[in-house]
Amino acid sequence: RSPEFHTQVARTNSSGPSMQNVAHDPKCSVVIVNYFTSTMIQNCIDSLDPKAVSRVVIVDNSQDANELQRLKDISRYEVDILIQDSGGNIGFGAAVNIGVNVALGKSEDPVWVLNPDMIVYEGCIRNLLTVIHSGAADIVSPVILQGTDAPTVWYAGGSIDQTNGRAEHFMHGQRWIEKPEASLLEVTFMCGAAPLFSPNAWRSLGGFREDL
């Protein structure tokens, strides 16, 4: 019988759940898959809070010497950056699995899988870590927005109808108004753009499928 995990979307960008009984200065490992997105990855890493990130593992699917060098040139001195050459374009799931295995080989910090085009709001990582360490969820994602001047919702949770396989995104395309208080929403599916996993949840699920 498969274990049941609590998957939640944290509908907040700033204030978060109470930090009471949460590990002091918790951190996570970040895993990013690269396929000719080195410029995006630099911007993504620049947006991370170095006090909440123990390391960034970049798995390179590009199989291009110049792109690999651009990754090696990425600078963020407060955070360890580890680059893993996958040997070719092995797909997103397989590359994520490599990156997470590297990260969990270094520490038991929660692992945040991030798309390379993500820009992280201030306070976001700490809010997600609070959810994991408080036991409120085993896997959690932030709300994901698109646009800058008037951002709209790209992902804020969703549900999947197992009878017909149809997935519904909540609030997709709607104007986002930041909530004054954090709220968690239990969901039946989560996109792969920014999920944060507890180590136990990742190991029990066995990682991402590699045949999709």
Image (spheres, rainbow, N blue to C red):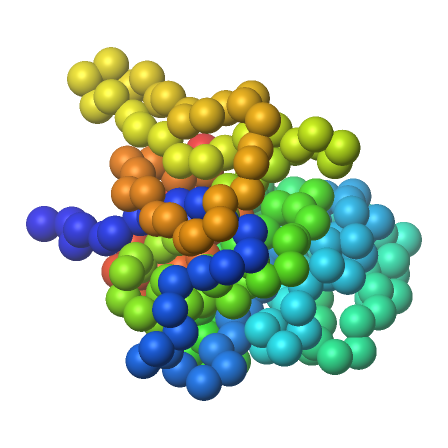
Q: Residue at x 65, y 60 (%)?
A: 122
Q: Quadrant of residue 44?
A: bottom right
Q: Which residue lies furthest to the top in this view?
A: 164
Q: Which residue lies furthest to the bottom in this view?
A: 24
Residue 94 appears in the rendering: no
User: Going by the image, does 47 lie left or right of 71?
Assistant: left
Q: Which residue is drawn at 70% across and 43% down?
A: 117
What x and y, as percent, mark residue 60?
Answer: 70, 54
What x and y, as percent, mark residue 116?
Answer: 68, 47
Q: In which quarter of the image is residue 31?
A: bottom right
> Up-down: is 188 above or below 160?
below
User: Going by the image, does 12 lie left or right of 132?
Assistant: right
The quarter of the picture where the C terminus appears is: top left
Q: Residue at x 62, y 46 (%)?
A: 115
User: Going by the image, does 37 lie left or right of 1?
Assistant: right
> Up-down: is 109 above or below 202?
below
Q: Residue at x 49, y 45 (%)?
A: 179
> Up-down: is 212 above or below 18?
above
What x and y, as percent, mark residue 105?
Answer: 48, 77
